[in-house]
Amino acid sequence: VLNRLSNPDSKLGVLRWLETVSLPGIVGEEIEHQHLLRAMDALIEHREAVDDVMAGLLRPLLDQELAVVFYDMTTIRAAGLSQQDDDIRQFGMAKEGVIARQFLLGVVQTADGTPLY
């Protein structure tokens, strides 16, 4: 979470980032890629509760009216043949001009670029 707030990167990028920062109680060399994946699996089970708590903590810090918000959406092409219950990936025309499985990703942000959702 701290990486996402200060210098967003991929999970592998987080491992490199941990080598450059000092965080009390965290030894970057002891954290492996699999640990980050397991943490994400644990968080996703409680996503709505985490979202609600984070929104409650961040909303007072915004200190602005939300009369104007911006959103952006894009499709992400996803590889793999597995099927999942409630799979968000659907076949459609990808940006590369081929039919592929993809999903829609969006962000809502304040006028100054602070992400809200």
Image: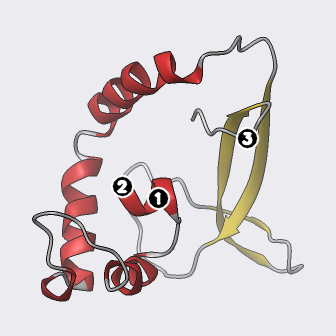
Q: Amino acid at mark 1?
A: Arg
Work out how far the residue at label 2 is from the one at label 3, CA to CA, in angstroms.
18 Å
Name the image quarter holding the N terminus. bottom left
Relative to 62, is 76 on the left or the right? Answer: right
Q: Count numbered badges in the picture.
A: 3
> On the image, numbered disc 3 is attached to which residue?
113
> On the image, numbered disc 1 is attached to which residue?
4
The residue depicted at 48 percent of the width and 53 percent of the height is 5
Callout 3 crowding tier (Cα within 10 Å): few <14, some 14–19, many ≥20: few
| Secondary structure of the residue carrying numbered label 3 | loop
| Residue 104, percent from left and from top | 67, 53
| Residue 114, percent from left and from top | 65, 38
Name the image quarter holding the C terminus. top right
| Secondary structure of the residue carrying numbered label 1 | helix
Residue 101 image-quadrant placement: bottom right
> On the image, numbered disc 2 is attached to which residue?
1
| Residue 17, percent from left and from top | 40, 79
The residue depicted at 52 percent of the width and 65 percent of the height is 7
Given residues 102 and 20, the one toward you in this image is 20
Q: Is residue 67 above or below residue 40?
A: above
The residue depicted at 29 percent of the width and 49 percent of the height is 44
Callout 2 crowding tier (Cα within 10 Å): few <14, some 14–19, many ≥20: few
